Amino acid sequence: MMNVGIIGAGRIGKVHCESIMRYVKGATVKAIADPFLKEDTVEWAKGLGVKEFFTDYKKILADKDIQAVLICSSTDTHSPISIEALKAGKHVFCEKPIDHDINKILEVKEEIKKHPDLKYQVGFNRRFDHNFRAAREAVKSGKIGDLNVLKVCSRDPGAPPVSYIKVSGGIFLDMTIHDFDMIRFMSGSEVEEVFAYGGVLVDPAIGEAGDIDTAVITMKLKNGALAVIDNCRRASYGYDQRVEAFGSLGQVAISNDTDSNAVISNADGVHAEKPLLFFLERYMQAYVNEISEFVDCVNNDKPVPVDVDCGLQAVVIGLAAKKSLLEGRPVKLSEIL
Amino acid sequence: MMNVGIIGAGRIGKVHCESIMRYVKGATVKAIADPFLKEDTVEWAKGLGVKEFFTDYKKILADKDIQAVLICSSTDTHSPISIEALKAGKHVFCEKPIDHDINKILEVKEEIKKHPDLKYQVGFNRRFDHNFRAAREAVKSGKIGDLNVLKVCSRDPGAPPVSYIKVSGGIFLDMTIHDFDMIRFMSGSEVEEVFAYGGVLVDPAIGEAGDIDTAVITMKLKNGALAVIDNCRRASYGYDQRVEAFGSLGQVAISNDTDSNAVISNADGVHAEKPLLFFLERYMQAYVNEISEFVDCVNNDKPVPVDVDCGLQAVVIGLAAKKSLLEGRPVKLSEIL
Amino acid sequence: MMNVGIIGAGRIGKVHCESIMRYVKGATVKAIADPFLKEDTVEWAKGLGVKEFFTDYKKILADKDIQAVLICSSTDTHSPISIEALKAGKHVFCEKPIDHDINKILEVKEEIKKHPDLKYQVGFNRRFDHNFRAAREAVKSGKIGDLNVLKVCSRDPGAPPVSYIKVSGGIFLDMTIHDFDMIRFMSGSEVEEVFAYGGVLVDPAIGEAGDIDTAVITMKLKNGALAVIDNCRRASYGYDQRVEAFGSLGQVAISNDTDSNAVISNADGVHAEKPLLFFLERYMQAYVNEISEFVDCVNNDKPVPVDVDCGLQAVVIGLAAKKSLLEGRPVKLSEIL
Amino acid sequence: MMNVGIIGAGRIGKVHCESIMRYVKGATVKAIADPFLKEDTVEWAKGLGVKEFFTDYKKILADKDIQAVLICSSTDTHSPISIEALKAGKHVFCEKPIDHDINKILEVKEEIKKHPDLKYQVGFNRRFDHNFRAAREAVKSGKIGDLNVLKVCSRDPGAPPVSYIKVSGGIFLDMTIHDFDMIRFMSGSEVEEVFAYGGVLVDPAIGEAGDIDTAVITMKLKNGALAVIDNCRRASYGYDQRVEAFGSLGQVAISNDTDSNAVISNADGVHAEKPLLFFLERYMQAYVNEISEFVDCVNNDKPVPVDVDCGLQAVVIGLAAKKSLLEGRPVKLSEIL
C-alpha cells in the first residue's frame, strides 16, 4: 500500500483525493497540505479516511512513509515543488502545466534524469477518457491506416472570470494545452509548425485583458499529417469535446457523453440531451484512471503513461501558437525550443 | 413503349400517373378514366402528356392499344374491375386491398389463373421503399441468421375523418394491412396465428364508429418466429414507420426519413428533424419503384414482385386480427381460409 | 453510520458489498454470511473493510448493531429470511424475486405490515439506471402526454446453463420479471391482462427442460394503454435493453450504453460499438444507486422506492404470462390474485 | 415554356438535360451543342424529347427561339461563351468555375452589367442540397446566434487521374472552390484572409504533377468569424460532405446521406451504411433544384440565387489559398483583387 501526499487541496486536489480513497487500489492518501486549508476540506477528507493535514507542504516531503506526492497547487509552484519532491525521493504526479516557462520545465526534466528510480507523471487527464482512448486505439492499431487529417474540437460551456483569464497564461497555455496534448496523443507524432487564428467573439472584456476567446489552430505534424483545433470559451450547449482522425483506410470520430441516451420525439422535432456540463462531469472516470495508472506505475515499476516530455511539448506548441497569433505567421516549433 | 390506362384519378391514381409520365421508362399513360373526373385533373394530366380522358373505365378496357391498367378506383370496385380487365386481356396493377371479402379475392385469383400470359400486381408500395428493402435484404441474405422476432411499428400522423373510418373496413384492413404485408415480406414466411389488443386512445368518435385507433398485434409465423405490430392513428411527431428484425446472428433496424439531417445543439438540448410527414412524402420514390417494376415485368415477362396471394394473405391476416379482437382470443389463419 | 449485514455472498451479494464499502455514504458492511463462504471471498471483503464473516445468517440477525440486512441468498430462501429478519427488527433489502409462490410473498407482506417502522425494499435495479430513469421522468412529467403504447425490448447476450434454467422458475419469473416491473415503473399503472407467445428458437435443450427462450408478451394496462415486451435469451450483439413509451404528445425512447461512442467509417461502412456486455456492465451504477437509496430511506425514514407490492405484482404478471402461454389465451391478473 | 440550349454534352450537361426534361416545369431543352457529340448521347437525348443537335454552339446562340443557355463545356471556354451568349441576348447558367483567371471573370461581369435584363447564374450546386440548405437556414434565421466558427469537411471518394489533376487548376480551384463558396453561403460574409496547409498524402504522382491532395485551410471572415476547411482527394468510406456552424447560441451540423438508414447489429458491432458514393449520387436533387430555380428566375424575373460575384469570390479565395500555400503565410484577399 503506497502512501500518497497531496499538495494543494483545491478542486483538482480534492478530485484526486476522493479517487484514491474510494477507487484506487494500492494507495491511500496519508496527508494533505495546503497553505489555505479550510476546515470543511479537512472534515470532508477525514470522512474519506485522510489522517494528516498541514499548511506547509514540506512536512509531506519530509515524511519518509510517503512514497509519492500529487502536486495540485497553483501553476507557478509546480516546477519548484516538483524539483524539491524529486530531491526528497518522492514519486511525483504533477498537474498540468508544469510551468509556462520552458526553462523551468527543462530544469524539472534535468532533475528527473538524476532520479531514474522515481516516476514523474503529468496530469493530462483526457488521455484516460474512454472515448479518447478508443479513438487513439483505432489510430494506433492501424484501423484507419496512415493518419492524414486530425481534428480536435474543444469548447467550454462558459468563460472563466476575467480575473482568472489575466493570470491564465492565455487561452493556448490554459485551455488549448489539453488539445495540443491530444494532437500528440492521437497522432503519436510531434508537431512541426503551427498557425493560429484567434478572435474575441464571446466577451470583449477578454480582449481587453489581452487574450482571445475563440481560436482555430492548424498544424503540420512531423509524420506529414495535418491537424486543426478549434476552441471557444463558451458553447451554449455545454462542454464540447470531440476528435476526428482521418486516415488512408478510414476515419474514427468520438463525440460527447450525456447523462442518458433518452430521445424524445414530439411535434417540435426529435430531441436528445446536451453533453455533460463540464470537465468534472465528463472526465471524472478519466481522473480516476490516470491516478490508478500512476499508482500502478509506481507500485509495479512501469513507465508512466504521460511523461515530462508530454508536459514540455504541449507548452512548446502553446508558445508557438501564441507567437503565431502575435506575428500573424506560421511558427516552427524549432523557433521555440 | 407500353400504353397504360389509369382507372380512378384520385390521389393515388395521380401519383402513378405522374410517376409513369416523368420517371418510368418503357410506359406512357394513354388514358385516364374516372366517373367524377375534374377539369383541373384533366388540365394537370394534359400537362404531363396524357391525351385521353373518360368517365367510363370500359372505354379503357375496350382500347386495344392499351396493354395494362392501373386500378386506383374505390376499394369496392377493385375486384370486379380486376376481373373485367383480365377478361379484356389487360395486365393489371391493382391498388390494395383487392377486396375486404376473401371470396371476391379468390374469384380474382381464379380469373388470373385463366390468363397465364397476363401480369397481376398488387399495390403494396412499402416493399419498394429503400429502407424496408435494405432490411429485407439483410434478412434474406442471412446477415441476421434465422429470424426470431420481427417488430413493425406503424403510426400515422393523424386520424382520418370518422366518415372515412366508417367505410374503411376497420383499422386492420385499412391501415395494418400494410404492416401485415410487411410481416410476410420481411420474414418470407406465412403467418399461422394472430392475437390482437386494441384501444380507443386517440378519439372517442372512432370508438363510437365501431373501430379502434391503437393496436398491438402479435403473431406466430410458420417458420417459428414471433412477430409484433404496434399501430396508432396519431403520432404527434409525424409518420412513424419502422422495422426491427432480430435473428440468431444479429438484428437489422430501420428508422424514419427526414427532410434533412441537420442537428441543432443549443441550451435546450440536441435537436433533429421530425420524420417526413406522411405516406406521400415518405413513399414517393417507392411509388415510382413499384410502377417501374410492374412495367418491367410486363415488358420483359418477369414474375410480378407482389402477386395476388400477397393481396389475399394480408386480408386474411387482417380478418383474423379482427376476429381475435372481437373474441378476445388468438385466431389461427386456418379459421379464416 | 448504518451497519449492514449481507446474507449470501454470491455475485450480487458481492456487487452490493463493494457498492456500500466504496460508494455509499452513511452505511458500512459489518458482516457477511454465506453457508458456502469461500476463502477468497473473505480476503476480498476484508480488503474492502468488512470485519465479520459467518456461515450462518442467524448470527447477523442476532447482531443488535446491525440495522439492515441485504438478502442475496438463493431465491427459495428470500421469503423465510425476509420474515425472520423483520421479526429480528432489521430493515430489509431483498433481491428479486421475493418468491415464485404468491402466498409466500403475501406472508412477507403480512409481516411487513406488523413492522411499520422497518423498511422493506425489493431489488429491481433497472429502476435506478440513468436511461430508464430518464424515460420514466419523461412519462411522469407529461412530456409525452397520455401513455398509449409501451414497448420493452430485453435480450440477454447468451442463455444460462440448462441446469440453471431448470430451477429458474421459467423465463417469465427469471428474466421477464424485470421487464414486467419496467412496465409498471414506466406506466405508473397496474396490468390488467396478459397474453404471451413463446418459442424455443435459441436452444432445443431449453425446450426439453420445459422452458422457452424467446417470447413476445402483450398486455392491457389498467390506464388503458397497451404494452408489449419482447425477450430472447441470446442476442449475438450483447445485452439489449430498450424502452419506447409512446403517448398523445410524443415518444421517449432509450437505447443501450456502450464502452465508448467511437464511430469508425471505412470501406465496409460506418461502425459503432456493441452494447455493454451484460447486466454487471450495464447496471453497475444502477446497483450503487439502488443501495444508496435504500440506505437513505432507512437513515432518513423515507418511503422505499421499490416496495413489496412491486415484488408481488411482477410475480403475479409472470404467473399470468405463464398461464397464458400454457393455455393459449389472454389471462387476467385477477385470475392469479 | 422557355427553350433552353445546352452547350457541352459531357457528364454535367447530361445531368442538366435530364433534369429539365423530366423534373423542371416551365422549360424544355430545344438543342444540344457539343463539338464531340456522340451518337449514343443523341439517342439518349432524343429519348428525353430533345430535337436539335449541333457540333457548333453558335447555332444555339443564333436560334431566336432559345431564351437561355447552359454552359457546360470545358472550363477554358466558360468565359468567352458567357460573353458571346450575353451578347446574343441569352440568359446564362454557367458551370463553375467561370474561369481560373480573375480578369476573364471580370470581363464577364462587365458584360453582365450591360444586360440588366438577362440572368446570369453560376453552378454552385451544393447550395441547393437539402442538408446544406437546412444548415444555412439555421444560421440565417438566427437559431445559432452570431456565427463564431464555421467548419467544412469535404473529401472525395478517390482522386481523379493525374492527367486531370494537371489541367485542373490545382485542388483549390478544382475541388475546394465548392467549399469556399460554402463558407460564403453559410456565413453570409466575405472572406478577409486565408492560410493554407497542404500535403501529398494520397498519391505521390499528384505531388509530382505539382499539386497537393490533402489540405487544411483556415480563414478570417469579414464578420469576425473564423472558418476552416479540410479536404482530401480520397476517403475510403466515400464522399464526405459535412458542415458545422457554431455560434453564440448553439451549433448546427449536417452529415452525409446514405442509401438507406438500415443499421445492423451483430457480434462485430453496430453497422450503418457508408455515405452516398459521389457527387452525382449525393447532389442529384440539388442539380434539379438549381436548374429549377434558374428557370424560375428567368421566367418570373427574380434575382438569381448564385450570381457572378459568387463565381468570382470563390476563385479569389482559391487564388489566395494557392498563394498562401506557395509562400507559407496568410494571404489577404485584397492582395488578389
Image: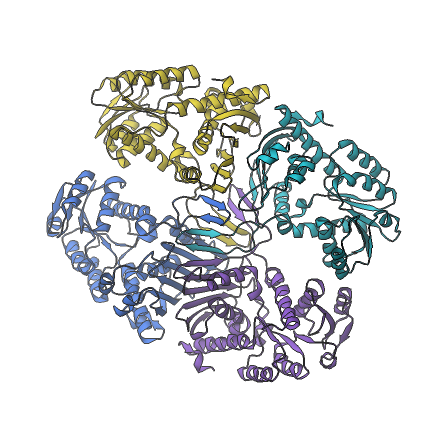
Chain colours: A yellow, B purple, C blue, D cyan
Give the left or right position of residue D314, taking residue C154 as reference. right
Give the left or right position of residue A336, taking residue D226 as reference. left
Residue A147: image location, x then y, percent: 49, 36
Q: Is residue C337 visible?
A: no
Residue A275: image location, x then y, percent: 46, 41
Q: Quadrant of residue A276?
A: top left
Q: Quadrant of residue A28?
A: top left
Give the left or right position of residue C90, taking residue B132 as reference. left
Q: In which quarter of the image is residue C20?
A: top left
Q: Residue at x 50, y 62 (%)?
A: B137
C249 in relation to A259, above or below: below
- Front residue of C126/A198: it is A198
Residue A50: image location, x then y, percent: 24, 29
- Front residue of B246/B219: it is B246
Q: Is residue A98 visible?
A: yes
Count of picture labels: 0
Give the left or right position of residue D228, taking residue B327 as reference. right
- Front residue of D165/D61: it is D165
Image quarter where the N terminus of chain A lies is top left
Residue B52: image location, x then y, percent: 77, 73
B201 in relation to D303, above or below: below
- Front residue of A332/D130: it is A332
Q: Which residue is drawn at 72% across and 39% down?
A: D97
B254 in relation to B212, above or below: above
B173 in relation to A165, above or below: below
